[in-house]
Image (cartoon, grey):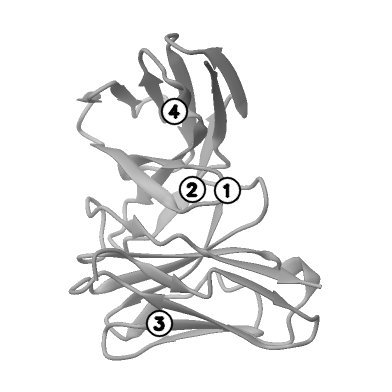
Amino acid sequence: SQQGEEDPQALSIQEGENATMNCSYKTSINNLQWYRQNSGRGLVHLILIRSNEREKHSGRLRVTLDTSKKSSSLLITASRAADTASYFCATHGSSNTGKLIFGQGTTLQVKP
Amino acid sequence: GAGVSQSPSNKVTEKGKDVELRCDPISGHTALYWYRQRLGQGLEFLIYFQGNSAPDKSGLPSDRFSAERTGESVSTLTIQRTQQEDSAVYLCASSTAPGAGNTIYFGEGSWLTVV
């Protein structure tokens, strides 16, 4: 079963609006990562938030983590057409194998 | 190399044939991972290497799938007697070391179509 589940599955917004994607997971984690995938291409690492962190920023990205609810959110502010992509959350379990478990992803479309 | 390199980028094969997919990780990265992604789906973990050994191969879907790594560098994922359900993009990734907190870098993937 998937460790991470993203919500919504698909999101369509206008350029300039903010986009919020949510991720829920099932087991205890060491950290949670967000990745971006342009259509037909590999994944690009966006941001990592550790289990003892509650919020992290990187440019127009803001990630929150609520370990009590086992959930995370990714906010993209002032979206651009170039942000159109699929976004995945991924978690490391509490063991140290490095195995990342990915969710199904949210497909974001930003209309110019 | 500058990034994770995978070959071939695209492969069309007939059902029943064997295929080999190659991954060149970032130089110096000891950890190497293989994932599978079916169309419109998330990533399925297949196997992970630390050096040349595979501590976790729990995701390999059947005994038709195998992988090896040599010289703590290049890895090959082999699929024997391919089936149509094997059609997917196979993504390789590497990191400086296994373990939580290390960023994992992905290649562009090998698109496999079994006809």
In the image, what residue type sits under mark 2?
Phe
**Is the Cβ of the residue at disc 2 closer than 8 Å to that at disc 1?**
yes
Is disc 3 on the same chain as disc 2? no
Q: Is residue A67 left or right of residue A9?
A: left
Element type at mark 1 = loop
Residue that mark 2 sits on? A102
Element type at mark 3 = strand
Residue that mark 1 sits on? B42
Packing grade of label 4 (10 A; few <14, some 14-19, many >=20) is: some
In the image, what residue type sits under mark 4?
Asp
Residue that mark 3 sits on? B75
Q: Is residue A44 left or right of residue A39?
A: left
Of label 1 and label 3, which has the lower sequence position?
Answer: 1
State the residue at coordinates (18%, 74%): B28
- Return the x and y of residue A96 as percentages of the image width and height: 27, 60
Instruction: Give me the chain letter of mark 2.
Output: A
Packing grade of label 2 (10 A; few <14, some 14-19, many >=20) is: many
Is disc 3 on the same chain as disc 1? yes
What number is the disc on residue A83? 4
